[in-house]
Amino acid sequence: MKQIADLYQSLNSDPAREKLGFSSEMEAANLELITSRNQQEAATSLGKWLHRFQPCLFGRVSAKLDRIHYCILNEADLLSQDEFIKRKVQQARQEWTRAAFEGRKSAFVILAVSEKLALAAPDIQLNQFAQRLCSLYLLEENISNDLVYTDEVFLEKPDSQRTTWRWLAGVNFFAAAADRRWWQDHRIPGGVGFSVNSVGHLVKSGALMQELNEVASDAAPLVSTKVDSLAKALEFAMRTIWNAADAASGKATQLLPLGDQALLPVRECPADLPGFLKEKNYCTYLGYYHTDVTLPSDYFLPDVRRSPRIHAQELDFTYLFRDHVDNPAYSTMGEGRRIRGDGPIGSPSLPGKTTKSEPIEVQISESLRLRDALGG
């Protein structure tokens, strides 16, 4: 298997970028990140950008509240041996594991930063680079496109037994190459990266609350209820889809009209939605990419506009609130049954949302990584 350094050296410049340019906010953030003097400076710059320009409301809240733990890889890191890169990523992952367990962080972002990466073409070389970086993070020998990969995130339950909640957290790819392309919602300044987050952890750790007021769309005020349940988080998941970028081929994710509620799997919406969302479907939405897939193949094509061969698919909101035998996304996450085997999770089957929901309770001793993060 090729080393990161070799894959990095083989990256091609994006022939479309000279014509496309970068949006002004990306141009400024690229410069800040590429010229950062250290990891903390780079993390601060990235956090400011995420707070302002990340379309996901949960991600924006996490950035605003400093709930994201960052691992920044600069060019010198990327030219090092894979063993060095793996150690750096795994150390940051362990730090995030401990911080999440203590309720101080919820999300994890790995960002590889350099001018070469910021200007890289979305092609097979960038694809291979991303696969290898993801492999060093998840400790999986082979990472494939078009699969769902997840990590685990933990939170200590406030009881005398030190029981712990555990969630599966989705792993998603982002790149500067997405700016001004049809998949713009997956852009990130500075290069390429992976974002790992759990809505369930955010809700349970109390990080949402009133902070969502500052990052919500101006379309309507927020419902004045405390966001302390996944059902109440539905509004913000719907707002995230509503806020999708109007990119080169329009919105890559879209809300659907409500239609006949009697035909929906849940006939009554569990959240008191604002007026502009009341006539929208609260069970499913449309996406031209699957929002849980870690590395969609369609990202690694030169296309600026979406190819006609890419068709919209219905995606799921009910992972947030529908506890039912035929809703495996909720039961798998809610009850904790791992339906994809014992290793890190990658599957060609996509049973709707599978990365964010209610936790299960586990003992600290059950997770080697958590034990290591807590110092044994």
Image (cartoon, rainbow, N blue to C red):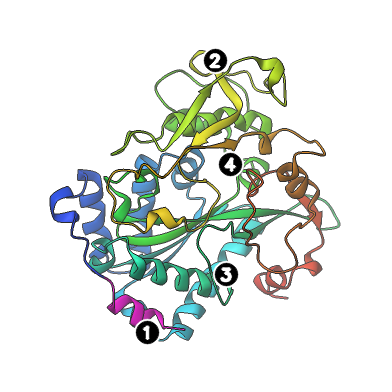
* Residue position for label 2: 279
Mark 2 vs mark 1: which is more N-terminal? Answer: 1
| Type of amino acid at the residue the image marks with label 2 | Glu
Lower position in the chain sequence, tag 4 or tag 3: 3
Which structural element holds mark 4? loop
Identity of the residue drawn at 29% across and 43% down: 305
Residue wearing tag 3? 138
Residue 207 marker: 4
Which residue is located at x 86 percent, y 57 percent? 161
Residue furthest toward the right? 161
- Residue 290 visible in image: yes
Q: Nearer the viewer, mark 2 or mark 3?
A: 2
> Which mark, by number, is residue 80?
1
SS state under label 3: helix
Disc 2 and disc 3 in contact, CB within 8 angstroms: no
- Cβ–Cβ below 8 Å for labels 2 and 1? no
Pointers 4 and 1 in contact (CB under 8 A)? no
Distance between the alpha carbons at the discs numbered 2 and 3: 40 Å
Q: Which range of residues does the magenta coloring cover?
A: 1-11
Q: Is-magenta flag for residue 7?
A: yes
